[in-house]
Image (cartoon, rainbow, N blue to C red):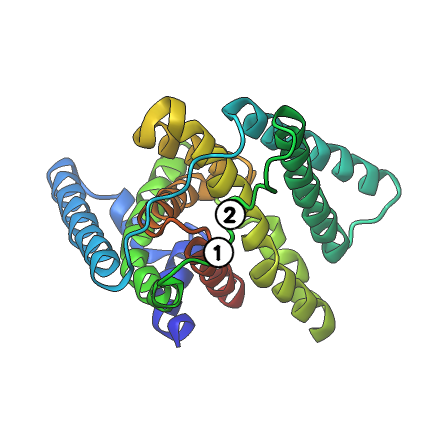
C-alpha cells in the first residue's frame, strides 16, 4: 500500500533529468520564481517535519537511549574497517570475475557482522566481564506501538525526502554531474525471480538490522557522549550517506539518516529505525 501511494514521488525522484519534466522546470526558473520555489520547499519541509514530530510524540512512547557500550574511537574504527574491507572485497571479486550482486551483497553483510564482532571484542577487551553490547537491539516496553507507527512516519517524511532529492538533483544537474541510481538497486532487475527475491530478502530483512546497529546503535550513540546530540547526528548521518557511494543520493540519504537518528533518540531503540530503514529500502527497490 505504501509503495502504491509513494510511487509517483519515488519515480519522480529517480528519473533521469532529461526525462523529468519537474526537474527541468525547476532548474529553468528565473531568480524570483526560484526564490519563491525555495520558500515553498522550505514550507513543505517545515510542515511535514512538524507532522513527523507530532506522529512520534503521539504514537511512540518516549524512551531515552541507553549509555554507549563502545567509545567513539572504537565505533569510527569499525566504520573504517567496513570501508576498507568493502573495497578489498570489491577488488577481490572483480579480480576473479565474480560480479554477482547477491554474492557482493552477502559479502557486505559479512563485513557488517565483522564490524559488530570487532566492536563487541573491543568492548569486552576494554572492560572484561561486561555484558554483550546489544547496541539497543533488545526489546523495550512500548516497542510494538513504535514499530506500528513507522509506516506513517515514513509516509509523512517522503515529501521532505522528495524536496531534498529534487533540490540536490538541481544542484548536480547545474554542475553537470551524472544522476545515476545506486548500482545495487539496478543490478538484480534483469535477473530471475529467485535472485530478485533473495536480494529483496537481504536488502529489507538483514541489511537494515546490521546498518542500524552500527550507525545508530554504535556510532551515533558513542559520538553523542562527546559531541552532543546535534554534532553526533550530523557526523554519523554524513558518514552513513558517504558510505552509500552514490553522489546523486548523498543529500536524500543524509536527510533520511537524520530522521533515523530522531526516531532512535525518541524511542531509545534501534528496532523502529530498522523498520523505517527496511520500509524505505523496500519502496526504493520495488519502484527502481
Q: Which residue is mark 1?
A: 274
- Residue 34 seen from this side: yes
Q: Quadrant of the N terminus?
A: bottom left
**Taking 143 as reference, is 127 left or right?**
right
Q: Which residue is mark 2?
A: 212
Asked if the residues shown at circle 2 and circle 1 are in contact, with their CB atoms under 8 angstroms apart, the answer is yes
Q: Is residue 84 above or below residue 202?
A: above
Q: Earlier in the sequence, mark 2 or mark 1?
A: 2
Residue drawn where x is 32% and y is 58% of the image = 158
**Taking 158 as reference, is 276 left or right?**
right
Q: Considering the numbered disc 2 on the image, is that residue within a helix, a strand or a loop?
A: helix
**Taking 139 as reference, is 25 left or right?**
left
Label 2 and label 1: CA atoms lie apart by 6 Å
Residue extending farthest to the front is 129
Residue drawn where x is 81% and y is 41% of the image = 94
Q: Position of residue 275 (x, y in %)?
A: 46, 61
Amino acid at each position: 500500500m505504501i509503495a502504491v501511494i509513494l510511487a509517483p514521488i519515488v519515480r519522480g525522484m529517480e528519473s533521469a533529468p532529461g526525462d523529468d519534466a519537474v526537474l527541468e522546470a525547476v532548474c529553468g526558473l528565473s531568480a524570483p520564481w526560484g526564490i519563491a520555489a525555495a520558500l515553498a520547499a522550505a514550507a513543505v519541509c517545515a510542515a511535514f517535519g512538524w507532522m513527523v514530530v507530532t506522529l512520534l510524540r503521539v504514537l511512540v512512547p518516549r524512551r531515552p537511549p541507553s549509555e554507549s557500550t563502545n567509545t567513539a574511537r572504537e565505533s569510527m574504527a569499525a566504520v573504517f574497517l567496513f570501508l576498507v574491507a568493502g573495497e578489498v572485497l570489491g577488488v577481490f571479486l572483480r579480480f576473479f570475475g565474480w560480479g554477482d550482486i547477491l554474492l557482493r551483497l552477502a559479502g557486505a553483510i559479512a563485513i557488517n557482522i565483522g564490524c559488530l564482532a570487532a566492536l563487541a571484542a573491543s568492548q569486552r577487551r576494554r572492560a572484561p566481564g561486561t555484558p554483550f553490547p546489544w547496541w539497543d537491539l533488545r526489546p523495550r516496553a512500548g516497542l510494538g506501538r513504535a514499530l506500528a507507527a513507522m509506516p506513517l512516519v515514513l509516509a509523512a517524511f517522503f515529501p521532505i525526502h522528495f524536496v531534498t532529492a529534487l533540490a540536490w538533483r538541481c544542484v548536480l544537474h547545474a554542475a553537470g554531474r551524472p544522476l545515476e541510481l545506486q548500482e545495487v538497486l539496478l543490478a538484480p532487475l534483469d535477473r530471475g525471480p529467485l535472485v530478485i527475491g533473495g536480494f529483496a530478502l537481504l536488502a529489507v530483512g538483514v541489511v537494515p538490522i546490521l546498518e542500524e546497529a552500527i550507525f545508530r546503535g554504535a556510532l551515533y550513540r558513542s559520538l553523542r557522549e562527546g559531541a552532543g546530540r546535534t554534532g553526533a547526528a550530523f557526523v554519523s548521518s554524513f558518514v552513513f550517506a558517504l558510505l552509500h557511494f552514490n553522489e546523486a543520493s548523498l543529500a536524500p540519504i543524509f536527510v533520511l539518516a537524520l530522521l533515523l537518528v530522531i526516531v532512535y533518540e525518541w524511542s531509545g531503540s534501534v528496532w523502529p529505525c530498522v523498520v523505517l530503514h527496511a520500509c524505505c529500502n523496500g519502496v526504493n527497490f520495488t519502484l527502481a
